[in-house]
Image (spheres, coloured by chain):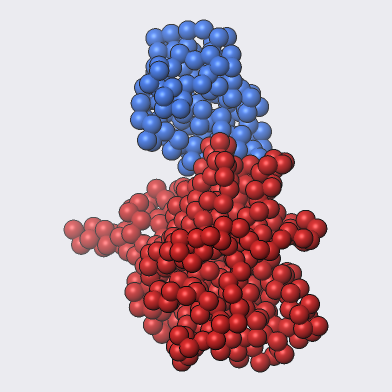
């Protein structure tokens, strides 16, 4: 079965470049002819994940795999990990600093939005070692 | 797709194949093959960026000539506000307006009067509040075309009011019919266009659908013709009816400026428009209520058919608003028709021109091939092959429209390696 894998390095604490991976993914998914509504979901969820890695994890790697019926987005970092996943999944909960919030981020909607917009989401995290989030989107 | 009227045409005898136009094209519609530039007219939105970019004036434009007036008993000129700005030394705009009577027009209708109506309607719309925000202006047909072909998910954000030019045509027709008792077929309505995008829209695009417009003549042609007339001796029959509100639409931000207490954004210049469309598509501008887009830098004053420099024209429009029209903050026209009169009678249709294949699995396969070829290309985006970027060349190769040997950079290294 045909599949394409795109790999993007996400730089930590660089808000200028944040969103680059999801932008690239968007234009390529459009060229493949993925339905606009699905692209929108993928991009919103992926952008949130990308921002999370920029803010909290000193960057990481975003991998997008496209198959004829499935898009898989894996966001992997070696950051500090998530201490309380249940709490992090709550809307409005955020550990972002005041400075980050002043930039317009850290509203506590990252993980909840990722969950909301993906068809399936798995969080694999270990405090002090890092986090890997896998989101699946049906085409 | 029906053949589009080509308002932009390449003169191959003058084309040097330099790739300037190709690099400036916002839709990657241009390729240079065998030393000459070619356009994919499906993708062309007639924005005119290539016309500005061409150093050898090989990109020509098409529009109606004055001969078209002969087919009608009664000739109406739809005059955009930018037309005033073409005569920076004339301080009485009435002279400019009435000068059109001297070159064959029986009636002159200011497009700004329609813009006035639309400004009032839009205020109303935002007060009632039953709209999908951000609402996107349709004042620039090049931007509308771009949305319908490349940013389709924004279609429903396009305002459903008639674009000012179309409303002007409708209002002018009704006014003339009332005044003269003539039938529609005897009345010719012609727009004095500042840009090829509006010519295209009138001749074969969305604007041709209402049947109210009969042609489009470039502003530059009209100015040329007027040079034979001494403008200062023009007899003033008609006064200016439009207000400050409508006149403002010709510069970027002018349409939005008529909407108090609305979170608004105005972008001009096609590259800036593209960056805003990307953000809109991502839902990042959900805090904005109204978005005004102009493909030309500065708004319609920047159209390639204008004879006066964009910034001089902009300054003229501003001074016109502050001096002659300083007390004319509101229009004398009234919204006296049912609301449907001011709305577009169709739904905007989207087309998909950018997918690699109509079938998703095939497109995916092609994308995989594109990525494979791209790995072998130098990634310099030099454009010497005649495709705007290495990725575009890889796509062209996959679509059977180019070959890998067209990459001169790779060929240079291949040959040098052989001799080593």
Residue at 77%, 56% in the rendered image = B339
Residue at 66%, 53% in the rendered image = B120
The colour with which the image depicts chain A is blue
Instruction: Name the spot of residue B146 as percent of width and height, x first.
Output: 57, 57
Instruction: Name the spot of residue B228 as percent of width and height, x first.
Output: 46, 92
In the rendered view, tell whether residue B360 sits above or below residue B303. Answer: above
Which quadrant would the C terminus of chain A be assigned to in this image? Answer: top right
Q: In the displayed structure, does residue B44 sit left or right of residue B418?
A: right
Specify the quadrant of the image occupied by residue A13: top left
Q: In the displayed structure, does residue A85 sit left or right of residue A98?
A: right
How many numbered marks does the figure carry?
Answer: 0
The residue closer to the viewer here, B121 or A13, is B121
Which quadrant would the N terminus of chain A be assigned to in this image? Answer: top right
Residue at 60%, 89% in the rendered image = B104
Instruction: Name the spot of residue B91 as percent of width and height, x first.
Output: 43, 74
Specify the quadrant of the image occupied by residue B34: bottom left
Specify the quadrant of the image occupied by residue B202: bottom right
The colour with which the image depicts chain B is red
Residue B320 seen in render:
yes
Residue A32 seen in render:
no
């Amino acid at each position: 079965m045909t599949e394409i894998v795109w790999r993007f390095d996400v730089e930590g604490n660089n808000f200028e470049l944040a969103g680059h991976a999801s932008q690239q993914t968007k234009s390529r998914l459009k060229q493949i002819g993925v339905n606009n509504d699905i692209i929108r979901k993928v991009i919103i969820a992926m952008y949130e994940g990308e921002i999370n890695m920029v803010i909290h994890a000193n960057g990481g790697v975003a991998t997008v795999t496209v198959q004829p019926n499935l898009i898989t987005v894996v966001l992997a970092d070696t950051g500090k990990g998530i201490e309380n996943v249940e709490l992090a999944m709550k809307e409005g909960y955020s550990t972002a600093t005041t400075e980050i919030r002043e930039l317009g981020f850290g509203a506590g909607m990252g993980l909840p939005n990722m969950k909301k917009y993906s068809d399936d989401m798995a969080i694999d995290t270990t405090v002090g070692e890092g986090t890997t989030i896998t989101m699946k989107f049906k085409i | 797709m029906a053949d589009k009227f080509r308002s932009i045409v390449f003169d191959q005898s003058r084309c040097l194949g330099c790739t300037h136009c190709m690099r400036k094209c916002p839709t990657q519609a241009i390729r240079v093959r065998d030393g000459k530039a070619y356009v994919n007219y499906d993708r062309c939105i007639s924005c005119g960026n290539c016309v500005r970019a061409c150093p050898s004036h090989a990109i020509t434009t098409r529009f109606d000539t004055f001969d078209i007036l002969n087919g009608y008993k009664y000739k109406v000129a739809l005059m955009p506000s930018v037309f005033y700005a073409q005569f920076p030394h004339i301080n009485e705009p009435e002279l400019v307006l009435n000068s059109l009577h001297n070159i064959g027009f029986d009636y002159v209708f200011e497009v700004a009067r329609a813009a006035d109506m639309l400004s009032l309607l839009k205020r109303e719309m935002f007060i009632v509040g039953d709209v999908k925000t951000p609402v996107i202006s349709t004042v620039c047909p090049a931007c509308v075309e771009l949305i319908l072909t490349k940013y389709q998910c924004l279609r429903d954000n396009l305002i459903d009011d008639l674009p000012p030019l179309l409303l002007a045509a409708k209002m002018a027709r009704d006014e003339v019919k009332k005044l003269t008792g003539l039938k529609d077929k005897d009345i010719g309505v012609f727009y004095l266009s500042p840009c090829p995008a509006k010519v295209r829209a009138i001749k074969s695009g969305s604007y041709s659908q209402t049947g109210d417009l009969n042609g489009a003549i470039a502003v530059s042609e009209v100015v040329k013709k007027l040079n034979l007339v001494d403008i200062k001796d023009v007899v003033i029959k008609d006064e200016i009816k439009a207000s400050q509100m409508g006149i403002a639409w010709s510069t970027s931000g002018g349409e939005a400026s008529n909407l108090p207490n609305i979170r608004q954004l105005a972008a001009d210049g096609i590259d800036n428009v593209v960056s805003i469309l990307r953000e809109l598509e991502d839902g990042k501008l959900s805090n904005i209520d109204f978005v005004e887009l102009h493909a030309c830098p500065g708004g319609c004053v920047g159209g390639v058919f204008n004879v006066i420099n964009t910034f001089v024209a902009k300054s003229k429009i501003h001074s016109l608003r502050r001096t002659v029209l300083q007390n004319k903050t509101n229009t004398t026209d009234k919204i006296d028709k049912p609301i449907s009169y001011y709305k577009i009678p169709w739904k905007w249709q989207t087309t998909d021109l950018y997918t690699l294949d109509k079938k998703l699995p095939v497109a995916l396969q092609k994308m995989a091939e594109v990525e494979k070829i791209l790995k072998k290309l130098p990634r310099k985006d030099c454009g010497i092959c005649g495709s705007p970027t290495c990725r575009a060349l890889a796509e062209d190769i996959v679509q059977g429209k180019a070959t890998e040997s067209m990459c001169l950079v790779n060929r240079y290294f291949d040959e040098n390696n052989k001799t080593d």
